[in-house]
Amino acid sequence: MPNNFFLTGPPRRGKSSLIVDFIPEIKGPVGGFVVQRMLLSGKTVAFRLADLREEPYCLTKSFQGSIRDLVIYQKKNCSRWIPVLSTFNQKGTRALQQAVNCSLLIMDELGIFEEEALLFQQAVLARLRSTQPVLGVIKEKSSPFLDRVRATPGVEIHRIEERRTASLLGNFLRERGLLAR
């Protein structure tokens, strides 16, 4: 039985929101990370990594001056996103390691900007090979790292389709005794 359930699909289709809907029903502690969208006047200006053992599961935050724990950002008047590998390698890796005793490990989300964050990649792949259930989001894009995640034994990837996907996710959690109801 696969132990790792990932959602994929186009941006802004509700993948992370579906996970958020199930979080209150999970028995036991939830750990891992979420990559939060940072907004300034309704525009995305950066993304930061939040450790779910330290912060609530929140998908967006308002930009309040400087931002700690950035994973990607844009310089002023530049459309190119710039990754912050040290955040992935330090905070991301720590979030995955400290969640080892949690009922469920969240990885929201894995993408192309982690391609050179080798410590983070090692931590992700180690958790996926463990017996701990993992629930995550993975970009549809191809990269050596994302392709290794997809090829890891025990990884199931489901394209977001509202009713069917929610039902499959509920079954995944129920079969592992993770739902309170």
Image (spheres, helix red, strand yellow):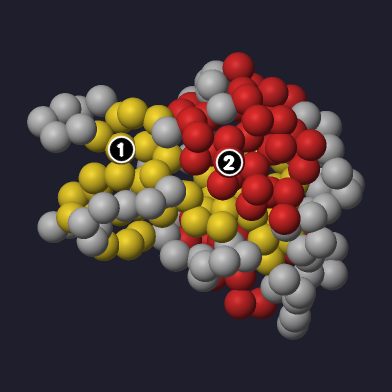
What's the residue at 37%, 37% (across, down)? 72
Instruction: Tell me the residue that label 1 is attached to.
Output: 73
Q: If the image is split into quadrants, where does the C terminus sit?
A: bottom right
What's the residue at 66%, 77% (across, down)? 25
The nearer-to-camera label among 1 and 2 is: 2
Among the 4 quarters of the image, the one containing residue 175: bottom right
Q: What type is the residue that disc 1 sits on?
A: Tyr
| Disc assigned to residue 132 | none
Estimate how packed mark 2 is, as few (under 14), some (14 to 19) or many (20 or more) residues with alpha carbons within 10 Å.
Answer: some
Q: What type is the residue that disc 2 sits on?
A: Gln
Instruction: Tell me the residue that label 2 is attached to.
Output: 90
Residue 13 visible from this viewpoint: no
- The foreground one among 119 and 79 is 119
- The foreground one among 92 and 128 is 92
The span from disc 1 to disc 2 (Cα, nearest Å) is 17 Å
Please state the horizontal and vertical placement of residue 91, each as a whole percent of the image: 56, 47
Estimate how packed mark 1 is, as few (under 14), some (14 to 19) or many (20 or more) residues with alpha carbons within 10 Å.
Answer: some
